[in-house]
Image: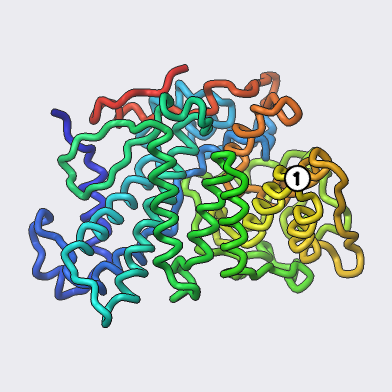
Amino acid sequence: MKKINFIFLLSIICFCTTSCSKDWLEKKQDVKLIIPTTLNDLDMLLNTGFDYDGRGASEISSDEAEYSLDQFNALPYSFQRSLATWNVLQFEQMGANMDEWDIAYKQIQVCNVVLNSLQKISRAHANEILYDRIRGTALYHRSRQFLNLAMTFCKYYDPSTAKSNLGIPLKLSDDIDEPIFRASLEETYQRIVADLQSASTLLPVQKVSYTHIAKGGAYALLARTFLFMDRYSDAKMAADSSYSNHNFIEDYNSVNSSPSRPLNIQSKEMHIPVNPRMALGYPTVARINGELYNSYDVNDLRKILFFKREPDNKFSFRGHYLSALFSGTTTPEVLLISAECNARLGNFSKSMERLNLILEKRFRKGTFVPMQARTKDEALDIILSERRKELLTRCLRWQDLKRLNRDPRYAKTLQRAVGSQVFNLPPNDPRYVLPIPQYIINFNDIEQNKY
């Protein structure tokens, strides 16, 4: 029987040796005996190393960027060039660089250590608030990474095929010797939903600190999950629950546009600060798709705050909410989900009301005219356009392409010209699902995606 791959063991060493109390560490010399024993230990474990996602690969593959030949060759790593041209078979062999998989399962393993350790600590009246927050936080972060993995390595969720389509390995135990296998896509999403529903009841309304998750963030991730399952009524309710607990929207009229990164302001829009690792080099090397840039109104402050004109007279992205790209949930994403779901459910006035809450804080004061829609199609056209403009570089566009490609009205063939070569990615192409790194297949003998 093959063993769980080594990243789970490494994650315990990494997190435990950097995150927990000195006394606890001094007494735990054998890694097999490194078991956190107090709620404080567990709380510290969950507040270190969870500020990363591994979804940069899909960001590079999406249609938000364009490259000249020199810019394409300036991408720091060859696997990024493979991603930019949808050469997934070559990317598969470069699995040593696969943050998408490794980061996710390192965080999942720590969450499992925490959840297992909680079972050995009695929940009492004196500790119930801390106990519930720790459990909710662990369930949230594990679900966040399960969803990231499903978005990257699985087909889009379709209820008619989800039971037969492959999902991800649902690692729910901290036993590093446990064999793993790919669950179905149905089982994968059921687990994500169930754990986020639990997390949303356990977490507090107010954040303990800037880096801690709270109730609004758990509902936001649940809304994102339901949207990607086409469960529009459920997504709308989760989004509305998130907004009722966390409703801050940054007024871009109050942001100074002079700094090189004017939005690196630790905005309260973010539910939790998270950035994707593999997007290294993408925002500054590439240029923003010209059609996308031109879609912003002249009075839209995002056109000023998001972009920087380069010497080649094209634009790079500078609208980072963090020192790197941002991939977490925000109040505007929640409102966009609510707006889209209301539109799909036939409530056009409510959908525009939700959308306008965002846009009035994005346009120059005195210039914004509220959006209106008379039909479902008109409302969806407006909302999906604004979703793309607001959530640019958030590592969501790839999944949006996967879901919208199923609708002929929105299906799109991606095309990227690099020098004299032109690369194409048709709608619903198998390459929308990235291959699992080969070294993972070798270690665990799990099934690879088919091309």
- Residue that protrudes farthest toward the top in the picture: 451
Nearer to us in this view, 401 or 157 = 157
Point out residue 162 in the picture as x, y percentages from the top left corner.
46, 29
On the image, which quarter does residue 188 sit in?
top left
Q: Quadrant of the N terminus?
A: top left
Residue ID at (67%, 47%): 341
- Colouring: rainbow
What x and y, as percent, mark residue 362? 78, 62
Decide if residue 179 is on the left or right side of residue 423.
Answer: left
- In depth, the one of 433 and 335 nearer the eye is 335
Image spot of residue 368 (x, y percent):
88, 62
Q: For mark 1, what is the residue?
A: 346
Residue 313 visible to the viewer: no
The quadrant in which residue 3 appears is top left
Q: Amino acid at mark 1?
A: Gly
Residue at point 24%, 30% (across, down): 444
Give the vertical position of 131 relative to 105 (above or below).
below
Residue occupying image coordinates x 60% and y 70%: 268
The part of the image, by quadrant, that contains residue 413 is top right
209 relative to 14, above or below: below
> At numbered mark 1, what does the secondary structure look like: helix, strand or loop?
loop
Residue 412 appears in the picture as rendered? yes
In the image, residue 197 sits, relative to residue 76, either above or below, namely: below
Within 10 angstroms of label 1, few (less than 14), some, or many (20 or more) residues?
some
